[in-house]
Amino acid sequence: MAPITGLILTGGGARAAYQVGVLAGLSRLRREAGELPGNPFPVIAGTSAGAINAAALACGADDFDTAVALLNRVWRNFHAEQVYRADAFGVIRSGARWLSLFTLGWALTRWRRARPRSLLDNSPLEDLLRELLPLDRLRGHLQAGHLRALAITGSSYSTGEHLTFYEAVDEIAPWTRSQRVAVRARLTHEHLMASSAIPFIFPAVPLSVLGRRDHVGDGSMRQSAPISPAVHLGADRILVVGAGRLNEPVGARAAVSGYPSLAQIAGHALSNIFLDALAVDIERLQRVNHTLSLLGPEALSRTSLRPIELLVIAPSQRLDDIAARHLHSLPTPVRAMLRAVGVSAGEVPCQSGGDRGAALASYLLFEAPYTRELIALGEADTLARREDVLRFFGWGRARSGLSAAA
């Protein structure tokens, strides 16, 4: 019986363009290996912006190459205005008022209407999702066998729990772990908006959760086990696509002199939310696999644990540094707002002696020059792992066997 392959797409705002490059590389390698059309990922799980990419793949599960091509076209031609209000009026209504609370909060909080919920207004994103993602197709793909399960993660501000919303073809019972709850649900665009609601930057979304109404934000928050949903949904082997470097190069990085700006602190916090839990979970799964490899058949039969084959593809370059080269691409009102919190435009961290807030900007740079460079990097990193990818999927084996028999 063929193993069930799962796909994990992590969060990271605009950094998720890298995932599209990885998917494009996979699509190319599969075609070159002569594999039959179809969906190589029966189980798909996504978080934050990765949840949007995951949903796009699931909606196009009957034609993987076409789904990847759609993602590629959208991300290669992105503009910030498609994701959040980037005009002067929109930024003033959300970001400027939000920042003013630091200095005038004692006065503004007396009026409820003066309490913005987030730094930016991401209502344009909902319009884009409804236009591009026909989620009503999910049920048909599940019933037709093109897909086994789709999971979207979020974090409840109301209860503090990490939530995994999922649709599946099999009767998979919801699971509960410490501060982690799975909820079987009919997935909607509201779930995607909630999962991608970067803390402080985008507003939380009210969702129905086990009979109550929770305000749910970005799924990367409190996500202690990013790989877990794919395992619970039946995956035997899992491809993880990260949105940040999991292993920094040897040697200290140049530090920024002086007290860190608000942008630097925010960027550091977001990196902790989006990147650190994945590295820990990968190490944990690798330790479990190693332990299981040491057990004999009898001991293995007494444990519910099972080995999970894992392939991880993550950026070979710092996305913060790439973002620093593209800060000028942001709309003028957004650049002005970011400058107010310490983002220095036009400075490249690796050359200027450290980060100048580009980490924060890297999550908001939904602009074509930046996303295209990330897509190119993702595809190049995937093609550089050609042998690992072909071995992981077993692509090309049938054709090699025919050639040998001939």
Image (cartoon, rainbow, N blue to C red):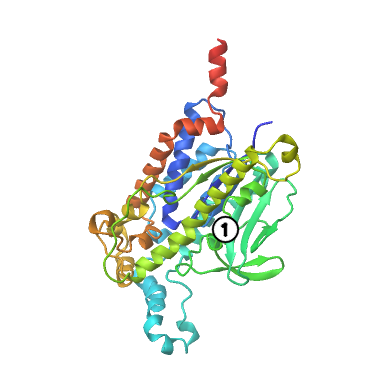
Left/right of residue 299 with respect to residue 229 in the rendered view: right
Quarter of the rendering containing residue 81: bottom left
Return the x and y of residue 311 as percentages of the image width and height. Answer: 52, 40
Find numbered disc 1 in the image and state the secondary structure of the residue it sits on.
loop
Q: What residue type is labelled 1?
A: Ser
**Image position of 277 (left or right of 146):** left
Residue 250 at x, y = what percent? 35, 48
The answer to which image quadrant residue 235 occupies is: top right
Q: Name the residue under label 1.
A: 224
Please tell me whether residue 339 is drawn above or below residue 347 in the rendered image: below
| Residue located 66% across and 66% down the image | 208
Q: Residue sitting at 49 percent across and 55 percent down?
A: 11
Q: Quadrant of the C terminus?
A: top right
- Which residue is drawn at the image coordinates 69% and 31% (left, top)? 1
Whether residue 55 can be seen here: no
Residue drawn at the location 46% of the way across and 62% of the way down: 124
Residue 17 in view in this figure: yes
Please tell me whether residue 111 is drawn above or below residue 359 in the rendered image. Answer: below
Q: Is residue 347 left or right of residue 209?
A: left
Residue 276 falls left or right of residue 345: right
In front of the other: 90 or 28: 28
Extreme top residue here?
A: 406
> Vertically, is 68 above or below 152?
above
